[in-house]
Amino acid sequence: MFNEGHFVWAGSRRLIRNGAGFTGDNQTMGCTARTVCICGTSMVTGGTTCNVLDTRTSRVRSKLPAITLMACFEFILLLAVGAAGAASLYQELPGQRMSLTAEQADLSDEHDLQDRDTGCPDGWKRFRSSCYGIGDTPVTWAAAQEICEKFGAILVEVETSEEDNFLKEVAGSRGYPGLWLGGTDMFNEGHFEWASSRQLIRNGIGFTGWDGNRPDNSNNEDCLHLLNYHGYRWNDVECTRHQHFACEIK
């Protein structure tokens, strides 16, 4: 436009002609007076490529640009396929998470059902309407009572022969020489009672399981335990002894 028929570089105003610097060969994709070049950066190679259109014949673009376009098409197709696969995977993963969550919920429900079936804390045993926790570490009578209270329980009160036999079986299965029960006469010497309910323990008032002439208070023996001596029987003993114990939640 500066000088009709004489192409120049617009910035430097230098002539573009053979013998005056480099010029594109119109036989190798060059843009001439009868061609139009549409150039851009390849998405595949990162280089600059040109599509050459013959203005006289409107014939096919050059081979190199056609290859580039095909590569671009393939690249876009790969992107589309990848995106579809990612979308599918994204949809599957939540499903897997939901499946795992459902399995966990089933296990949780099963565990809750087990708790509801027994109505007892973990590791405790149910017998009739009560739950029993067995202390595996020998402690004094007072310590056993305190431990039971921390669990919202009492040191066991034996009310029936069936309950007494249940506790004997538990103690026997574990080989305990003795098992603390909740009876004491420390409130009123010579008169044993259940520490929690303050109900008297004596013949004619509820169940008793004393051995022979027990209690005998032979050596300041103020606490009640199951003693394994030719079978488990009730016995009075010093409260400071260390023995296993049974807690009860009624």
Image (tube, rainbow, N blue to C red):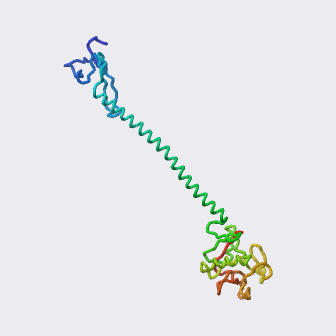
In-image side of 93 versus 109 (left or right): left
For the N terminus, the quadrant is: top left
Q: Which residue is rendered at x = 47% and y = 41% of the image? A: 87
Q: Residue 222: percent from the left, percent from the top?
A: 72, 82
- Residue 128: x percent and y percent? 70, 70
Q: Quadrant of residue 71?
A: top left
At horizontal 58% and vertical 56% (from top left) the residue drawn is 106
In the image, 141 versus 131, the foreground residue is 131
* Screen quadrant of the C terminus: bottom right
Q: Position of residue 40 (x, y in %)?
A: 34, 27
Which quadrant of the view contains residue 233? bottom right
Residue 126 appears left or right of 52: right
Specify whether residue 37 is in view. Answer: yes
Q: Quadrant of residue 147?
A: bottom right
Residue 13 visible: no
Q: Pick the residue in front: 63 or 194.
A: 63
Task: Classify 212 as above or below 52.
Answer: below
50 vs 211, left or right, is left
